[in-house]
Amino acid sequence: MPRRPPRPPAGSSRLDSNVLWAAMALVLVLEGLLPFISPGGWRRTFEKLLTLQDGQLRFFGLCSMLIGLAMLWFLS
């Protein structure tokens, strides 16, 4: 039977695929909270998002990415 390679020590910078899938699952859980708790509020917020122009949506997307990257940098 083939042996598995040894796991890297804790604190290693190697991305384990289990961590990636756990992070994706957490994103889905967090994104599902608002429609589950307040469907009407989620719908009103989504309708407001539809009225924004492309540049405004891109700005919010950029801010989200930068905040996420800063959080990853801070936590690593």
Image: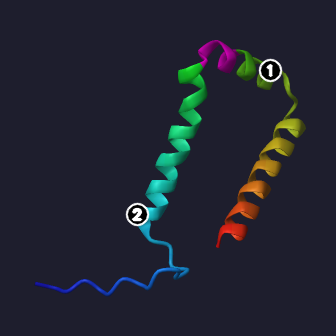
At mark 2, the secondary structure is: helix
How far across and how far down the image is residue 56, in percent?
88, 37
Which mark is on residue 18?
Answer: 2
Q: Nearer the viewer, mark 1 or mark 2?
A: 2
Q: Quarter-wise, where is residue 61 in the image?
A: top right
At mark 1, the secondary structure is: helix
Of the pair 58 and 19, the residue shown nearer to us? 19
Question: Magenta span covers which residues?
Answer: 38-43
- Whether the magenta-drawn stretch holds residue 19 is answered as no
For marks 1 and 2 on the same chain, the one whose residue lies earlier in the sequence: 2
Three-letter code, disc 1: Lys
Of the pair 53 and 26, the residue shown nearer to us? 26
Three-letter code, disc 2: Asn
Tell me how many marks there are: 2
Check disc 1: other Cα within 10 Å, few if <14, some if 14-19, many if 20+: few
Q: Which residue is mark 1?
A: 48
Q: Is residue 51 left or right of residue 2?
A: right
Quarter placement of the N terminus: bottom left
Of the pair 73 and 5, the residue shown nearer to us? 73
